Amino acid sequence: MLSPLMIGLYVFVLAVFVGFELITKVPPTLHTPLMSGANAISGITIVGALQCAAYVDNPVVSNYIGFFAVVLAMINVVGGFLVTDRMLKMFGRKG
């Protein structure tokens, strides 16, 4: 029987491959609008990572994994908002 950690690892690896395939198929003009939508998903990821870190049997390992997940999700959120802000400034009036 597989442990929950191994199942989670399998899901993560599959998500990486599927995500890479999807992103390579998106035209460059759609990357920024999709990144804006991904910020909301990363916000959900942050909440899920905090919950996973709080409710587990092995608090030391889960705290490290939860912290790592929160850091990566926050980098994604901040980067997405910076790119979206830059894109919106390109369409603003020239002063």
Image: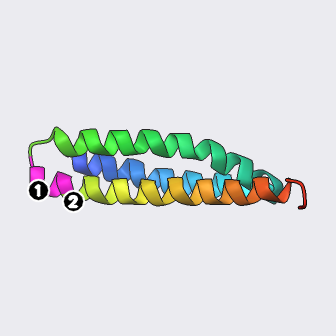
- Name the residue that disc number 2 marks: 64
Amino acid on which the number 2 mark rests in the picture = Tyr
- Tell me the distance, in whole angstroms, between the alpha carbons under discs 1 and 2: 7 Å
Q: Are marks 1 and 2 in contact (CB under 8 Å)?
A: yes
Query: Which labelled disc corresponds to residue 60?
Result: 1
Residue at image position (28%, 43%) is: 50
Whether 81 is drawn above or below 37: the answer is: below
Residue at image position (56%, 46%) is: 39
SS assignment at label 1: helix
Amino acid on which the number 1 mark rests in the picture = Val
Residue at image position (73%, 47%) is: 33
19 relative position to 44: left or right: right
Magenta-span inclusion, residue 59: yes
41 relative position to 24: left or right: left
Please tell me how crowded label 2 is: few (under 14), some (14-19), or many (20+) other residues with Cα within 10 Å: few
62 relative position to 90: left or right: left
Magenta residues, start to end = 58-63
57 relative position to 44: left or right: left
